[in-house]
Image (cartoon, grey):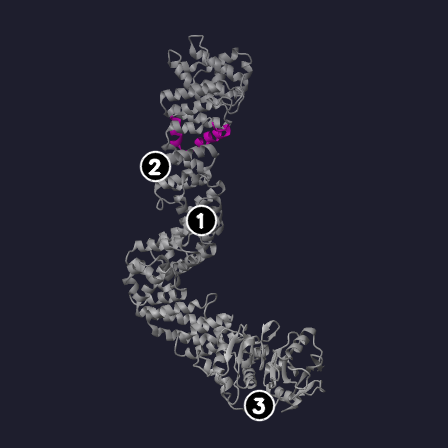
Amino acid sequence: MNAALEFRVQQQVHSYRNGHALAGSSIKLERGDQDLVDRLSDLAGPIGPGQTFAPYLTFYPLGAAPYYVVARTWQDLSAPRAGCVITRSFLVPIGVWRNGKVLSSLLAALEVEGRDLSRFVELAITPCAHEESHAFESSSTTEFVEAFFLEKRQPIVVFEAQSPEAFASRLIEGLWPAFRSSLAICTHAYSPRSIQGRPFDLLFAPASARSNFSAWAGRRIDGQTGNRQPRHKWTTSITQRLFGGTRVLPLAVSFGELDVALDEADESQFRLAMLWEELRQRSQESPLAILGMLDIVASLGQSEHSVSRLLGPTLRSSIRLAERLGTEGLFQYLVTLLGKFPSRLPPIAALSDIRRAARNATVQQPDEALAFLRERAEQGSAPPTVVIAGLADGLVKGQFIRESVDTLLSLDDESLLSLVGYGRKFASVLIDALKWKHSYEGLERLERLVATADVKLRSRARRNIIPFLSYGGEGHLLAELLRGVDGRTLSTSVRWLSASGAIVIPELGDALVITADSPEKQRLLRSLLTQLPQNNGVDAILAKAMTVAEDDLEWFRTEQFESTRASVILRDVLARSSDAELRRIPSRLADGALQAAHLEVADFPIDALIRILSLVPSSCDVLMQIALTKADYLAGNLGFRFVQLLLVRVLSETASHPLAVQVLNQFGPSIPARELALMAASPTLPTVQVSNNLMLFGDASESVRSHLASRADVLTEQIVNRRSTVPSVEAIGAWASLISEAILAAGEATSLRAASVALEFALSSTNVQVSPLLRVAFPRVYEHLRNSETASSMFSFFSFYDWDKCKIARKDLVSAFISSVWPPADLLRIADEVMEVESIHRILGKAPNGKEFLAQALADPSLPLHVRNAFFGVA
């Protein structure tokens, strides 16, 4: 043997020196270890006078020092008292002892050293070649093996064993390192021995010492009793390895390639390893073996990687073997198998095999598969999801689902929803079958299931159902599937519906809109829809997802839709909005919304169109533009109210504007003249607006002016009743023109009433240039005075103290002119108009400052020549 393989041991010798004591040592131990060696080197138990015994061995580990003790004890017959012994103890490094194959060398060295008390030095020992020996024959090996390895661990004493040294040596050589390093054995003891508070694992004792073991709590074996029949299946093989051959075949604690720490393996792990090997061999024929192997793996705390790498092939093979068990047996086996993975999934390949096996069994016996589902539901234990998935895969084969819709719908809620959630193809075929059968009850059932499902199963059902929706009857189901989802899920669902083309189905689009139950989701939905290929269905949903609220319209404006698409969407949004919503449209966005909508009667009933135009707070300019383009449709009773509102706005908000004139020309004649007059000079309007309105009518068509002139009396009264406010000079001219037209075309009473009210107003407004009114109104009133025998009460502004009413009117007129800012020439024009040149001339000649006034009037270059000549002729 190579010297490099030699190892060194320390040694101690104990003998009698006024008592049993340490005689010599090559090492100094800690106090506790030394006390242990001192105690165990002495004889265990008393012996009788003259009693002798053969040398024996003691094996035990030290507590603190890294040594294992191998000691031989001889009886010291030379000592002065009985029971004295000499013991030589080798302290073997624990690492050397664990590795084994050194016991025979140690025992040989102990035998050579014998009882020599002179050598206390460290020894170098070279392992000797292992020699074959005869098979160990002992009548107690079977019982010992079972007690030591296969039953609950207890300390053992063997009485009257044959060759206890050989027995112990074979046992030690056959043990695995961890067990070998922890054992305490003594081949000859007269009483129980202990180490560090625990009994020795194995003692050999003579029959005479039985009484000393009366309190022994461990196992007793009679070494003289014949071997009985083994009670354990592994007894014979272990016995044969340790005691049956010419060489000991060491036992091993091995779990194949599993990553198991065996440094401290004991007999329980040894039994587990034996079972592992047995199951490994059986796994080639029985699918049940893998179940035991998985239990062992769980008890050993193996990683998922180890299971996948080492047990994957066996696991997959067992699944194939289990397919021979029939449908019911297979499903039960798969459930049990998956139960062995409580906190992790089997390897992916095994999961695929499980699903495939479940699918194949379902294809062959679908009714039995459904019966299995019902049985599990009754037990309150749902099958694992991978089994459900395989079962769902099997049910889609052939026409089973279409032919058995009612049977499937009779399943309990969890089973049915699990099939839908874990079987994508199953969900597709089931949805198709319900549609084919027009089973609204089935859809309602699914809707209820989704409503009560947990989050995970609800999510899976959503993923498997939505891509296959295809008609309006599924709208409520879609709405339930999407209830409360987050933005990411909503986005995914929109993509699914778009990919299948179902997004254009109105009821499904409505469900999407319902789902967008917050401003954030509404914005997201609109954004998603704008990214899809444009079509009428998408635009319809987009319109339903919009309102006329400021944020929505602002978003729509910034999206910059193509013109035609924008108009279609906005028309729908406007048509669906309530009156209150239309009124609340921000004015800054109203014009853009109406213009972008391109409102057409072809797209709207006229009443809907008028409603929108009447309520949206758009600018008057835009409203006029739209109204003019829709003029043909606004005629008649439906359009009358809108035209009224339009003209109220035109006459309330616009100045001289070409569109305003067009609106007046287009719609003015359709409004009663009295109402039009009231609109034009409403007391609520500012004076400047009234002035604008008078000039608007002045620019209007003849028909509009004639229409308004027919109620010039009302217009004049409205203006005069404003009292402190006077229209602009230009507006007064337009007003005078309307009265003039009334005199020519209106009725007698109307024209006289308008003229008299205007004349009264003018005569009292000497500080304002109202002479155009005087030139129109005075001739009409004067004509009436001239032709009437009595003065009407409407002329109360004249003080008729003379029978000649015309004379009084002339005097009042001249007096007013002289004290006014009116052009003096206008008095001469009026005189000419009423053919009273001489009378006016005479009044001016007598009036204070009359001559100067006349001279100023005659000097006006605008005065017509015939009027000037008439007054000069009088002079």
| 162 to 397, vertically: above or below | below
Confirm or deny contact between disc 3 and disc 2 (CB under 8 A): no
Q: In the rendering, at what x and y percent does residue 465 appear?
A: 38, 59
Please tell me whether residue 702 belongs to the stretch shown in magenta.
yes
**Left or right of 357, for residue 311:** right
Q: In the rendering, at what x and y percent does residue 623 appear?
A: 43, 39
- Of circles 3 and 1, which is in front? 3
Mark 2 Cα shell of 10 Å, populated few (<14), some (14-19), many (≥20): few
Secondary structure at badge 2 equals: helix
Q: Earlier in the sequence, mark 2 or mark 1?
A: 1
- Mark 2 → mark 1, Cα distance in angstroms: 37 Å
Look at the image and tell me whether residue 228 can be seen: yes
Which numbered tag is attached to residue 638?
A: 2
| 474 to 194, vertically: above or below | above
Q: Earlier in the sequence, mark 3 or mark 2?
A: 3
Query: Type of residue at label 1?
Result: Asp
Look at the image and tell me whether residue 500 can be seen: no
| 836 to 521, vertically: above or below | above
Which residue does the numbered mark 1 point to in the structure image?
517
Query: Type of residue at label 3?
Result: His
Quadrant housing the N terminus: bottom right
Secondary structure at badge 3 equals: loop
Mark 1 Cα shell of 10 Å, populated few (<14), some (14-19), many (≥20): few
Residue at 49 percent of width and 12 percent of height: 842
State which region is magenta: 684-710
Residue with the most extreme top position: 802
Secondary structure at badge 1 equals: loop
| 821 to 470, vertically: above or below | above
Q: In the rendering, at what x and y percent does residue 96 appear?
A: 62, 82
Which residue does the numbered mark 3 point to in the structure image?
130
